[in-house]
């Protein structure tokens, strides 16, 4: 059985990759979604930016203690990076378009953990964090790449 933390991260990837917006049958419009657990992330994203010109990476940089009950509650603060190479992008979908779509797809969706216990609780659903998104400064090596960092949060209960 996988951990609650892993299942929440996997749920984000699944919600995105199951949507037709990201899995367009026209491979020039396909938007790949990666998680930090998928092998050589840097090379996969670089290849994606060179081929399609846009990609999405789901990462979990922060876990907080939210324990207010007998059970252990953890706050998961996901960062979803939307990266675009505007020079190469063939998808007709900009980083800003993808950002809006991600927010629409994830807001108030169940996080896939503790379903029997938490399905009615708002804490067990994904919600947009604050700040919702921020444009990261371009790197010296890749000054034309746009990187938006989106904030998606949820809470899991460890039984």
Image (tube, rainbow, N blue to C red):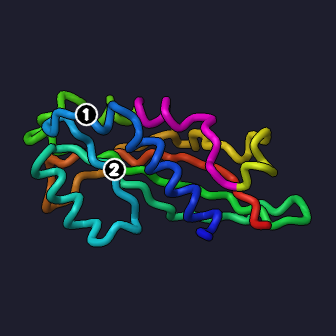
Tell me the mark number nearer the camera, choosing from 2 and 1. 1
The residue indicated by pointer 2 is 33
Percent across and percent down for residue 21 are 33, 31
Percent across and percent down for residue 137 are 29, 51
Contact (Cβ within 8 Å) of mark 2 with mark 1: no
The magenta segment is: 101-113
Viewer-nearest residue: 39 or 18: 18
Percent across and percent down for residue 54 are 22, 44
Q: Residues within 10 Å of mark 2 (few under 14, many from 20)?
A: many
Residue 98 in which image quadrant: top left
What is the spatial separation of the Cα atoms under label 2 and label 1, in whole angstroms?
13 Å
Q: Give left or right: position of 92 versus 71.
A: left
Residue at 71%, 62% in the rendered image = 74
Query: Under tag 2, what secondary structure?
Result: strand
The residue indicated by pointer 1 is 24
Q: Which quarter of the figure is the C terminus placed in?
A: bottom right
Tell me if residue 105 is in the magenta stretch: yes
């Amino acid at each position: 059985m996988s951990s609650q933390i892993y299942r929440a991260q996997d749920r984000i990837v699944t919600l995105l990759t199951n949507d037709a917006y990201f899995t367009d049958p026209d491979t020039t419009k396909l938007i790949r979604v990666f998680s930090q657990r998928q092998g050589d992330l840097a090379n996969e994203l670089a290849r994606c930016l060179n081929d399609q010109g846009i990609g999405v990476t789901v990462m979990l940089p922060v876990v907080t203690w939210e324990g207010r009950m007998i059970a252990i509650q953890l706050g998961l603060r996901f960062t979803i990076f939307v990266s675009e190479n505007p020079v190469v992008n063939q998808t007709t979908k900009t980083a800003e378009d993808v950002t809006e779509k991600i927010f629409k797809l994830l807001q108030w969706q169940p996080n896939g953990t503790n379903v029997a216990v938490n399905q009615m609780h708002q804490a067990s659903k994904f919600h947009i964090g604050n700040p919702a998104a921020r444009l990261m400064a371009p790197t010296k090596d890749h000054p034309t790449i746009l990187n938006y960092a989106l904030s998606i949060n949820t809470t899991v209960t460890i039984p």
